[in-house]
Amino acid sequence: MGRVTDDEILQEKFPQREPWDTDDEAQAEADAEPDEIDEAVEAKQRQTYPEPLTYGELLTAEFPPKRYLVENLIVEGIPQTLDGDGGIGKSLTAEGLSVGRASGQPIFGKATIGGPVLFVTHEDDYPDVMSGLKAYADYLGADPDILSSNLQVWSLQEHDITLAAVKDDGSWTKGPFYATFEKKLKANRGAFVVLDCRSDVVQMNEFLREPPNTFYKTVLTPLCKRYGVSILVLCHPSKASMSDGSWYSGGTGNKSALRNKLVMKLADPKPNADPLGPRLFGVLKRNKGKRDGMTVLTFDEKREIFVAGDDAAVRTKSDALHAVIVSEIRAMLQAGLVVQQGSTGHGQGPKDVAAALARKGIAVDEREVRASMKRALREHELGYRERIAGSRVPASFTLEPNPISDDDDNPDDWAE
């Protein structure tokens, strides 16, 4: 490097307006006009802030109660994480949560609030995700039509899905995926959103406090508030945190910046534990609200999904209700009534079946009746007769199941 001249020293101390003949970006930044720098700083400082509220104002305000999309697990309207070692089953478990939420069916022994789901993955392709979703849908007896309306999968393995690039001081810029992602949230207000996984959606040093604080509080939280979404980010904890029992990824900022963190880990903590053994799944950290104990999940080798011990009781209850609904439909058919799957015909529809059961003291809603009707067709417990063109004989369920044929892969098609 050549000797620094007096002119260069003077220029550094007293920047001139004339540009220097140099390609050095750092020097170009130093040569920026002071007025331009001042204006940028002032613009940042000119942010407007709302006035604080008094205790009296808060006392008279009406705040909606805090809800859980999945009972005591997924808190509505905030960013949260699921931490677990690679291969522990986070993605598959998130698929189960997604099917439960989308269908409104209980999952892992927990009640759910049905609604829209957006599952974003940079980890798996569509066939891999669909295998888990379909297995959970079959396991829960979820209505395919409801899932088709509520559940969207976005596999973007070949795309950059960075939402934000966060510097060490906490300042950040939007990533290439931010605008597209926000547009999708706007079209799916109130959705449960899964981001699989965190290293794919943000560029930051996770071991510092400021970057994760910015990512969760400044990047994700405004999106949650703006569109009423609940975002679950899947994270990989460090080996050190798994060893010391803290079970979260990166530095403490990854814990302090969040109000709800879930964890999934092997139930047996010994180093030589069976990697396919039972898992513990539940709340790792929550600032406020109820905290249940950990749920034990086991891998169902037949279905290739994780299930909870409480699922057996939930499924038994669901099967019992289904049997009652099918029994009522059979009774109506035996009485000579026309029972139809739709609600627009002249026969007895799902609403009428629900009303008949209500008169017997059995609480069931129209959606559950409709789901049982489709299940009865899939499992050949009842048949369905199509309306004959030019005839006054309406479409109706029949006591005799339809003959099984090669075209029976989707019995929902012949029940419309």
Image (tube, grey):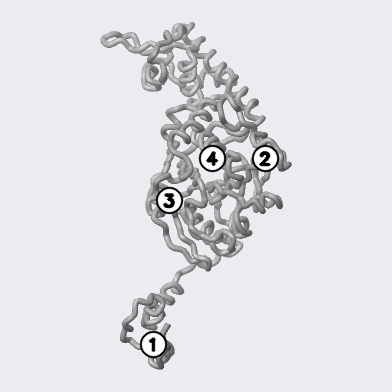
Separation of residues labelled 2 and 3 (CA atoms): 30 Å
* The C terminus sits in image quarter: top left
For label 1, count other residues whose C-alpha is less than 10 Å away and answer few (under 14), some (14-19) or many (20+). Answer: some
Residue 352 position within the rendered picture, expressed as x and y whole percent measured from the top left: 47, 19
Give the residue type at disc 4.
Answer: Ser
Give the residue type at disc 2.
Answer: Leu
Q: Mark 2 points at which residue?
A: 266
For label 2, count other residues whose C-alpha is less than 10 Å away and answer few (under 14), some (14-19) or many (20+). Answer: many
The residue shown at (51%, 60%) is 204
Separation of residues labelled 1 and 3 (CA atoms): 41 Å
Give the residue type at disc 1.
Answer: Pro
Query: Are the residues flagged by discs 1 and 3 in contact, CB closer than 8 Å?
Result: no
The residue shown at (26%, 10%) is 390
Q: Is mark 2 on a helix, strand or loop?
A: strand
For label 4, count other residues whose C-alpha is less than 10 Å away and answer few (under 14), some (14-19) or many (20+). Answer: many
* The N terminus sits in image quarter: bottom left
Query: Are the residues flagged by discs 1 and 4 in contact, CB closer than 8 Å?
Result: no
Per the rendering, the mark at residue 15 is 1
Separation of residues labelled 1 and 4 (CA atoms): 55 Å
Sequence order check: which comes first, mark 3 or mark 4? 4
Sequence order check: which comes first, mark 1 or mark 3? 1
Q: Mark 4 points at which residue?
A: 91
Q: Mark 3 points at which residue?
A: 161
Sequence order check: which comes first, mark 1 or mark 2? 1
Q: Is mark 4 on a helix, strand or loop?
A: helix
